Image: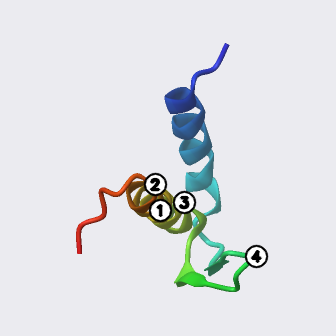
Amino acid sequence: MIHGDELISASKAGLKDVDFIKGNLVIPSTGEVLAQDVTPNEAFSKLESWHQTKMQMKHGKCET
């Protein structure tokens, strides 16, 4: 059984092979642009940061 951390690591490992691709990272439901002209690996990192920030806000631990 794969755990969350293992899944994240495996997902990141596969992104190294497609670093020639660039694009924008957008949240479809809101249209919020999280990053522009980024590789899949950069987008993944940005998405992790975005998620962490959202979780902190949800739990009242957001630092400004």
Q: Nearer the viewer, residue 34 or 12?
A: 34
In whole angstroms, how far apart are the C-alphas of marks 2 and 3?
Answer: 16 Å
User: Label 2 sits on what residue type?
Assistant: Met
Can you say which quadrant of the picture contains the N terminus? top right
Viewed as shown, does residue 44 lie left or right of 57? right
At mark 2, the secondary structure is: helix
Q: Nearer the viewer, residue 51 or 20?
A: 51
Compared with 54, 30 (above or below) is below
Query: Which is in the foreground here, disc 3 or disc 1?
Result: 1
Query: Which is in the foreground here, disc 2 or disc 3?
Result: 2
Viewed as shown, does residue 22 lie left or right of 50? right
Give the residue at x 40% y 62%: 57
Sequence order check, earlier mark of 1 and 4: 4
Give the residue at x 61% y 43%: 11
Contact (CB < 8 A) between labels 1 and 2? yes
Contact (CB < 8 A) between labels 4 and 3? no
Residue bearing the label numbered 3: 44
At mark 3, the secondary structure is: helix
